[in-house]
Image: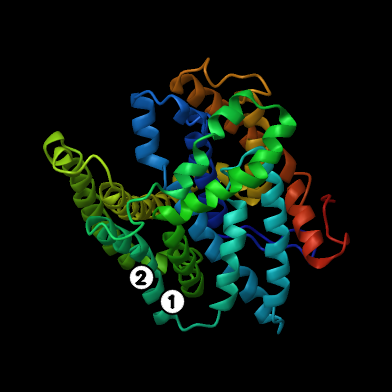
Amino acid sequence: MTTSSLLQHPDTPQRISLVDALRGFALMGLFLVHSIELFELYWQNPVESKVHDVIFFLFAGKAYAIFAMLFGISFFIIMDKQAQKGVDFRLRFAWRLLILFALGTLNSMVYSGEVLQVLAGYGFFLILLYRVPTKWLIALAILFLLTPNLIYHYWAAMNNLPGANDKLLSSVLYEHTGEMWTTGSLTEVLAFNVTTGSLAKWFFFFDGARGFQLFGLFFIGLVLGRIGFLVHPIKFTHVRKTLFVFAILAAIGLFALQQYLNTPAIKAQWPTTGNAKWFLDEMVNGYFCVAFMTILVLSFIAIYLKPLGQKVLDVLAPVGRMSLTIYVSQSLCSVPFFYGYGLHMYDKLSQAQALMIGMAFFSLQVLFAHWWLKRFHYGPLEWVWRAATYLTTNVPFVKR
């Protein structure tokens, strides 16, 4: 396994190419899902299509999970690098998270479904658990990945406990979002998104599987960072092969269970009112997403370790190095393209057309990232984030 060399300035960080490439892959998956969702306007008039089925099967809930896991890995890399210098970086990292939360809040004004705000908020728990022994982190990760919230809500709904079958708060908040996004002015949408839109996003996380699984993914990332899973992947060849087999078996079993639960005969046995079926579906889908995410990550690593595979996948590494800039620019460019205050294209494109446009735009982002990083040490927003973290503009930017 090779790593990219140190940049010329002594204060610039060493990059792990595999981590950057995998992050770029996750960003691609996130963007393709958002593209065929028309940045959430698809759900105003959902139409079944093969494009939707394929992209959602491959990336929905999985690309985001990879991104979240890598957040935990990056947290460890940053903390460990500072620890090697004898620096306790926890307070500085908390400040770094506050900056990311502010950037995410600004981004949420444009696209309320963005995840930077959520990642930053959850990130404080990484600081609190940084020194927790690995075995306890693994135990906590498994607990959260099993979504105990959904297990309880399913049981409560089945037994019709008070409030268990009330309409989910995220659904209530999302009821009027479509009308705002399709007919609202720019200022109306910005104000709506940073308040009601953001609240809907947070409750969506906690109503479903993601709210608890995000903790598990963060903790798994922290553990993988500690053991050097992506820094020395050859060392873990046997572990990777074993995990791959288990993930394949789990994914097949869970997918079969999903199909079974949605057969007409089984669906007919559920009451037409109540949340129990939704909680069960969300639980099983959450498990499936984790299993399939594991398959994607392990497959990516296996391909990357081949000389040709590394050459091909490293095309995504600059995107991963500029992930903040790339992610925010996707919102800034795409939302005005689809929403009512902009070009109003949400009801003029099929999902296939939206996918092709998304692929074309992401390809341009890849080219831009390569061009930019030949000339600069950091992406524009990465430089701002780093400068704000250290409260100085004395951060290398232009390459010499």
Which circle, 1 or 2, is nearer the viewer?
A: 2
Q: Quadrant of residue 340?
A: top right
Count neighbours of disc 1 (C-alpha within 10 A) and say few if under 14, some if 14 to 19, many if 20 or more.
many
Determine the residue located farthest toward the front in the rendered image.
162
Q: Which mark is residue 137?
A: 1
Q: Could you tell whether 14 is left or right of 162 in the image?
A: right
Residue 1, relative to residue 30: is it above or below?
Answer: below
Percent of width and height locating residue 306:
42, 50
**Near-viewer residue (373 or 36):** 36
**Near-viewer residue (47 or 3):** 47
Determine the CA span between mark 1 and mark 2: 10 Å
Question: Which residue is drawn at the image coordinates 60% and 69% (left, top)?
Answer: 124
Q: Could you tell whether 308 is left or right of 12 in the image?
A: left
Count neighbours of disc 2 (C-alpha within 10 A) and say few if under 14, some if 14 to 19, many if 20 or more.
some
Percent of width and height locating residue 119:
57, 58
Question: Which residue is drawn at the image coordinates 70% and 40% (left, top)?
Answer: 191
Percent of width and height locating residue 172:
48, 43
Q: Which residue is mark 2?
A: 143
Determine the residue located farthest toward the top in the rendered image.
348
Q: Does residue 13 appear anywhere in the picture? A: no
For badge 2, the amino acid type reads Leu
Q: Which mark is residue 397?
A: none
Residue 120, relative to residue 257: is it above or below?
Answer: below
Question: Which residue is drawn at the image coordinates 46% and 49% (left, top)?
Answer: 169
Q: Could you tell whether 367 is left or right of 242 in the image?
A: right
Residue 63, relative to residue 343: is it above or below?
Answer: below
Percent of width and height locating residue 330:
63, 36
